[in-house]
Image (cartoon, rainbow, N blue to C red):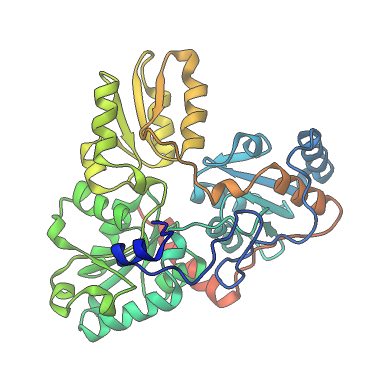
Amino acid sequence: MRVVTTAQSRQDLDVQPTPLALLLLGREADPKSERGVECPGDLPAPSDPDLVERARAAKEKLGDKVFVLGHHYQRDEVIQFADVTGDSFKLARDAAARPDAEYIVFCGVHFMAESADILTTDDQKVVLPDLAAGCSMADMATAEQVAECWDVLTDAGVAEQVVPVSYMNSSADIKAFTGKHGGTICTSSNAKRALEWAFEQGEKVLFLPDQHLGRNTAVRDMGMSLDDCVVYNPHKPNGGLTPEQLRAAKMILWRGHCSVHGRFSLESVEDVRARIPDVNVLVHPECKHEVVAAADHVGSTELIIKTLEAAPAGSKWAIGTELNLVRRLANRFAAEDKEIVFLDKTVCFCSTMNRIDLPHLVWALESLADGKVVNRIEVDKETEDFAKLALERMLALP
């Protein structure tokens, strides 16, 4: 963002001052633009030296009634209390495999908690310690925008040929749209299988909401060309595409991206190779196509972990994914003389994932221990049914 301080500089730059005042993080909120930024109840102070013991005591009091899920990108202070760790879909399945747990505390982001609610029983209650823990990528595709996109595809005469494939990193509404229109969900580890299935059903794919995963899978893994892909921009009339472009395309990619993985650049790869001889570059498929093309290895979060587990002692790795995980892996494998660094010089956490901190976790656990359910995530029945249909199609993939 460019900050303009004088009328003259505004004129020179030909930009207009924003009509909205900037809000101080953690001190102010705009309820019209931010969802759930205020948690009810009083959070413990982050400086409270007894936070760890309080979390442990509350979890012990709850016993088998609570099941705590921790995404790989969570802070270490939170991960230590997770019963299982994993990526978003693994955790949702883990939650579904524990029907006796009354409370599922999901230390992740909003769409993950929604998926857990969809896959668990009606009697189980899914709790997100901070309702403001969202996902910028998931928020880049709203139900209204996707419905409008489908109208554009219909007007172009191609909707009947299109099968939607939505990334796990999407809202329940988008998953429901996908299920309702004959599509499936995918993860970063099974995106190729999902696309192969989709092209057996139709001639084109609408891939939501991460353009990079869709493009990388189509071009790198399935042999398509970049010319087979077009990008639908929901902020432009007709997505910024002509009917002819839509008819010619095989992959209609939604203009969305991960704010963390999208920051890695080709320059990042070139720089780390210059600094660290014999380094192996390992990146997530949510990275830009040019980054993926320049990397030595590409894989999901789980594959990144498995690759480093199998790596020989003394090997050097630059990892293009969220910093909490990279740092945890660097510490874990330091004793094996594996050098693991963050791909970019400027470190970057997932800011929304990091909203789940120890004070929020303690507050959620202590509230549950006192019999008060807070920050429950519930997906309405119709949305749940169609979203589950799309998820079940994914689970049925060979």
Residue sitting nearer the eye, 385 or 108? 108
Q: Position of residue 360 (x, y in %)?
A: 71, 49
91 or 123, nearer to the observer? 91
Would residue 47 be found to the left or right of residue 371 on screen?
left
Residue 189 in view here: no
The image shows residue 80 at horizontal and vertical percentages of 66, 34
- Would residue 168 appear left or right of 72 to someone viewing this image? left
Q: Is residue 103 above or below residue 155?
A: above
Residue name at image x 81 percent, y 39 percent: 54
Which quadrant of the figure has residue 157?
Answer: bottom left
* Front residue of this view, candidates 339 and 205: 339
Look at the image and tell me in which quarter the N terminus lies.
Answer: bottom left
* Vertical relation: 331 (above or below) 371: above
396 to the left or right of 172:
left
Give the percent coordinates (x, y) of residue 278: 26, 19
Q: Is residue 265 above or below residue 224?
A: above
Please provide percent x and percent y for residue 238: 26, 79
- Left or right: residue 302 compared with residue 217: right
What residue sits 65% from the left and 62% below the top?
A: 121
Q: In the image, what residue occupies the spot 27% across and 81% down?
A: 152
Identify the image quadrant of residue 211: bottom left
- Residue at image location 75% in from the left, 37% down from the top: 47
